[in-house]
Image: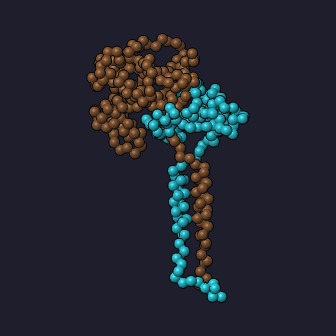
Amino acid sequence: MSKFKKKKGGELPAISTASLPDIVFMLLFFFMVATVMRENTLMIKNELPYADQVEKLQKKDLVMYVYAGKPSDRYQRQYGTEARVQLNDKFADVSDIKQFIIEERESKREELKNKLTTSLKIDGETNMGLVSDIKYELRRAEAFRINYTTKKGDAAQNMQ
Amino acid sequence: MAKRSAPEVNAGSMADIAFLLLIFFLVTTTIETDAGLNRKLPPIQEETTPPPPLKKKNIFQVLINQQNDLLVEEKEMELGDLRQAAIDFLDNGGQGCDYCQGKGDPASSDNPTKAVISLQHTRETDYSTYIAIQNELVAAYNFLRNREANRLFGMSFTEMEADFNDAQYNGNKDQLEDKIGAIRDMFPMKLSEAEPKENK
């Protein structure tokens, strides 16, 4: 059985993988800390435009999100290609926004109610007509603080 | 007493478990973009009181048509020139403005506190164009406010605002608020947005 005898000295010792879990855990913790769970499943295309004069939104729990954009490919057969509003996890009509805002406001504590901000996450290709309608509804619901949520970047990229 | 030491637990699969978790978090999470342009909407006015008359020279008119072209003060303009045009208009200092550094053109605005920027768009304008223009106008205000804040307090306005919003800031917040208010009074952001026009 000398065929199977180990060659001596010719081979490198196996690299120890004992520290692999540590490295992976480190990565894991980084992602757990750095990322936030998506609150809503987006059913629309949502490529935000760019801006560079941005201010950060404070306190996540005081923000209400209104999404708008064209339905994504999966939903186009059912909902068409016209840009729509999404509130929470479902498509909504512009006229539903007022009710949505009032419900959101009711769920917050009294002293925080006037600190609520509405974040408008609107796809860059949306027509301003829809955006104006949304803004009008927000005014009707007395949600005057808004934030046009954008990506950070040069605004000239929007024009291409 | 212990005859047998407890057998060592095999930790070889630890990496696999950790990888599984890692991949789960990678897939389910996104780094949220939560920054943007803050705006305040005007309340709805029920009765149609006529707005106070404004001198035409105190209004800086910005129109965007359905092809996303820009018309500023009845002249076509590229997006890149808008910021400077807005700065020139606001900082003109026709009368009653001792901190303005503009040319003092009598045909342009009197005073930054009187100057109003009017933004009008059609229903067909793209949202991204609208944001680009909003961004440029905010940039014009920020430029002027930073200049004055640097001159008076030796600190830029955006820094002051960032400090004010920072919970860990350990300076005098009331004083900072007064300073921010003073700068805001010098260049109040008067951005009027008309209802979109029906396309002609």
The residue located at (72%, 34%) in the rendering is A78
Residue displayed at 35% across by 18% down? B109
Check the image and tell me how it is coloured: by chain
Q: Nearer the viewer, residue A51 or B21?
A: A51
Residue B176: % across, % down: 34, 36
Q: Where in the figure is residue A50, as x and y percent of width and height?
A: 49, 36
Residue B96 vs residue B11: left or right? left
Could you tell me which quadrant the N terminus of chain B lies in?
A: bottom right
Quarter of the image for residue A28 reads bottom right
Q: Residue extending furthest front?
A: A3
Instruction: Give the total number of marks visible in the rendering.
Output: 0
Query: x and y percent of residue A89 in the render?
Result: 65, 39
> Which chain is the one coloured cyan?
A
Residue B55 to residue A155: above or below: above
Asked whether the viewer can see residue A102, the reply is: no
Residue A74 lies in quadrant: top right
Q: Which chain is brown?
A: B
Identified at 59% across, 35% down, the residue is: A67
Above or below residue B82? Residue A52 is: below
Residue drawn at point x = 45 percent, y = 37 percent: A154
Camera-side residue of A15 and B115: A15
- Residue B86 is left or right of residue A49, and the answer is left
Q: Quadrant of residue A133?
A: top right
Query: Is the C terminus of chain B in the top left, top right, bottom left or bottom right quadrant?
Result: top right
Residue nearest the viewer, comparing A124 with B23? A124
Residue B147 in sight here: yes
Residue farthest bottom in this picture: A1
Residue B193: x %, y % from top left: 49, 22
Q: Is residue A76 left or right of residue B131?
A: right
